[in-house]
Image: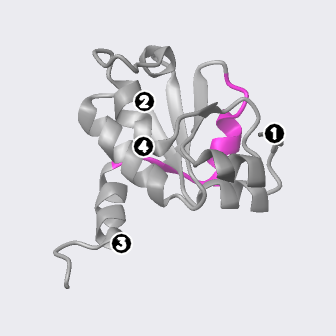
Amino acid sequence: MKLKVGYRALIEAAEREIETLDVERARALYGDDDTVFVDLRDPRELTREGKIPGAFHAPRGMLEFWVDPESPYHKDVFSSGKRLVFYCQSGWRSALATQAVQQMGLPRVCHIGGGFSAWKAAEAPVETVSK
């Protein structure tokens, strides 16, 4: 079976529409009171790899439900007005997630290119996550 659009094409299309931060720019926002880092990874990834200290965990599968204020699952962090910096392991899920919430109307959202892997490679702060 041949797909009409593969995952790489979806990611490339998303990246044309969204803001992608390199690790240096993301680190400059780290600790800013007006910025929230949002970890989109699976809980098992967090316990295995750690996370950016203070990041809000929003599993990718729940994101749209947590963003929408009319959803019974809405989380206040997404209506806080703060800048949201999404990340996943490699930057693929976060690119698609950033595009999705931008289409929903969420302002001030971007993602880290290269994801948590790039963050760790740059020796940026990481905290362990217990089960």
**Disc nearer the start of the sequence (4/1):** 4
- Residue type at numbered disc 1: Ser
Amino acid at the residue labelled 2: Arg
Left or right: residue 61 versus residue 42 is left
Under mark 3, the amino acid is: Arg
Magenta residue span: 18-32
Q: Position of residue 123 (x, y in %)?
A: 83, 55
Question: Looking at the picture, does residue 66 appear above or below residue 115?
Answer: above
Q: Which residue is under mark 2?
A: 108
How far apart, in angstroms, are the residues tagged by discs 4 and 1?
Answer: 21 Å
* Residue 93 higher or lower than 38, as above or below: below
Image depth: mark 2 or mark 3 in front: 3
Could you tell which of marks 3 and 1 lies nearer the N-terminus? Answer: 3
Residue 130: mark: 1
Which residue is disc 3 drawn over? 8
Q: Secondary structure at mark 1?
A: loop
Mark 2 or 4, closer to the camera: 4
Q: Residue at x 82, y 40 (%)?
A: 127
